[in-house]
Amino acid sequence: MENCIFCKIINREIPSTIVYEDDKVLAFKDINPVAPVHVLIIPKVHIKNVMDLNEQNLDILKDIHLAAKKIAGEMGVADKGFRLITNCGEEAGQTVFHLHYHLIGGKELGPKII
């Protein structure tokens, strides 16, 4: 396993507020939320970003999206709406190079891209 901050959260070396976990996915509250609901959803296996997806690890996207559906329901944003965002690469704003999705909601987000 890599030594990135998200891998350390998975290994419980760094504390986080976990809102969902199964054998493949972990989700926790963002420490710098941009909305009332701001959860990071990550695979437990280290994948740098979308560009490192391949035939062997592609099923993780299904697991992440099913987890996002459950989390959105539990956090009360499923009906009103939410964003599910991933950044890929430095110019896109990716700062932690471990595939992750931001589930953001709980307020009017408008057309602005975060």
Image (cartoon, rainbow, N blue to C red):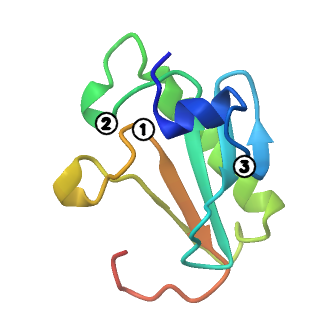
Q: Residue at x 27, y 47 (%)?
A: 88
Residue 54 picture quarter: top left
Which of 17/64 is in front? 17
Confirm or deny contact between disc 2 and disc 1 (CB under 8 A).
yes
Mark 2: few, some, or many residues within 10 Å (few <14, many ≥20)? some
State left or right for residue 86 relative to residue 5: left
SS type, badge 2: helix
Please name whichever residue, 21 or 8, is drawn nearer the observer in this view of the structure: 8
Q: Which residue is mark 1?
A: 99
Say few, some or many: other residues with alpha carbon within 10 Å of mark 1 (under 14 / 14 to 19 / 20 or more).
many
C-alpha gap between disc 2 and disc 1: 7 Å
Q: Nearer the viewer, mark 3 or mark 1?
A: 3
Which label's residue is closer to the chain start, 2 or 1?
2
Say which element carries label 3.
loop
State the image coordinates of residue 48 (x, y, percent, origin top left). 34, 31
Classify 18 as above or below 83.
Answer: above
Q: Which residue is mark 2?
A: 50
Q: Label 3 is placed on what type of residue?
A: Ser
**Comparing marks 2 and 1, which lies closer to the viewer?**
1
Considering depth in this image, is 92 or 3 the residue closer to the camera? Answer: 3
**Position of 70 compared to 31: left or right?**
right
Residue under circle 3? Answer: 16
Q: Residue furthest front?
A: 13
Q: Position of residue 74 (x, y in %)?
A: 82, 59
